[in-house]
Amino acid sequence: MNIRFHGHSCFEIESEAGRIIIDPYLRGNPSTTAKPEDFKQLDAILVTHGHHDHLGDAVELSQQTGAPIIAVYELAAYCQSQGAATHGMHIGGKHLFPFGWVKLTLALHGSGIEETAGGPMIYGGPPCGFLLQIEGKWLYHAGDTGLFGDMELIGLRHPLELAMLPIGDNFGMGVEEAAHASQLLRSKAVIPMHYNTFPLINQDVNEFLRMLQRRVPETKGVVLNAGESFELV
């Protein structure tokens, strides 16, 4: 299974079972060179919440590939109104797709949809994280969440191979909170995300790696630049 990072919170996951993308913020993302036109075939598009740097190019990708947008029901309904194929879910629910299982988890932050810069926010339902079981392996994409105690429950119930955690602070977990989250989740590996895209979320990723090593030495920290991949075997 190949996990490719496209900057910010966007990940492409490719396995023998299919190809998916999470939070496809491509156009306008200063940390990536990937473009929507690069994705001619997708099996699903997962979106954690409605903010523009996560919803991103999801509707265009769905129209381009026919892949459904998987999101909380309210956000899925909005995307459907924009011409996308969708599959609405809600927190605590799970569904088996051709590429594997998707389960929605709690995430602590907002989820308004801003159609125009500075315009009014449209309600996009609550934000979520994603638990994925692909080829028998559990992966966790936390979205923009703050730290919460039930991350321990997520780790206890799902033996995680990989967790993708925000470390940028201000809008979600910072370095220290993400290290504590890693301690609760007990994943075999952690990829930091949602940092250094904009000045407001600049962080020292090496400080995160040092904290991770102190708190959870059995968890491997994996730092990816946009376009780089991590192989799960």
Image (cartoon, rainbow, N blue to C red):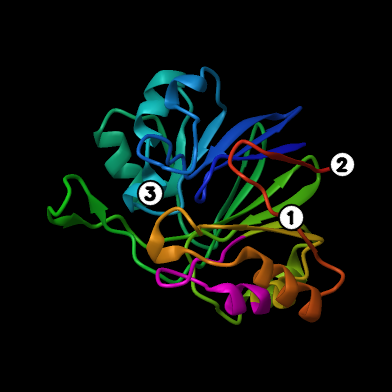
Dot 2 crowding, Cα within 10 Å, few <14, some 14–19, many 20+: few
Of all residues shown, which one is farthest toward the left? 119
Instruction: Give the residue at mark 2.
Output: 233
Q: Amino acid at mark 2?
A: Val
Instruction: Give the residue at mark 3.
Output: 53
In the figure, residue 58 lies in which quadrant? top left
Q: Residue at x 37, y 41 (%)?
A: 56
In 3D space, how far apart are the residues under numbered discs 3 and 2 (Cα atoms)?
A: 30 Å
Circle nearer the N terminus (1, 3): 3
Residue 79 position, x and y percent, is: 31, 38
Instruction: Give the residue at mark 1.
Output: 222
Q: What is the quadrant of the C terminus in the image?
A: top right
Q: Residue at x 31, y 43 (%)?
A: 77
Residue 169 lies within the magenta run = yes
What segment is highlighted magenta in the picture?
A: 165-180
21 relative position to 83: left or right: right
Residue 16 position, x and y percent, is: 76, 27
Is label 1 in a helix, a strand or a loop? loop
In the figure, residue 150 lies in which quadrant? bottom right
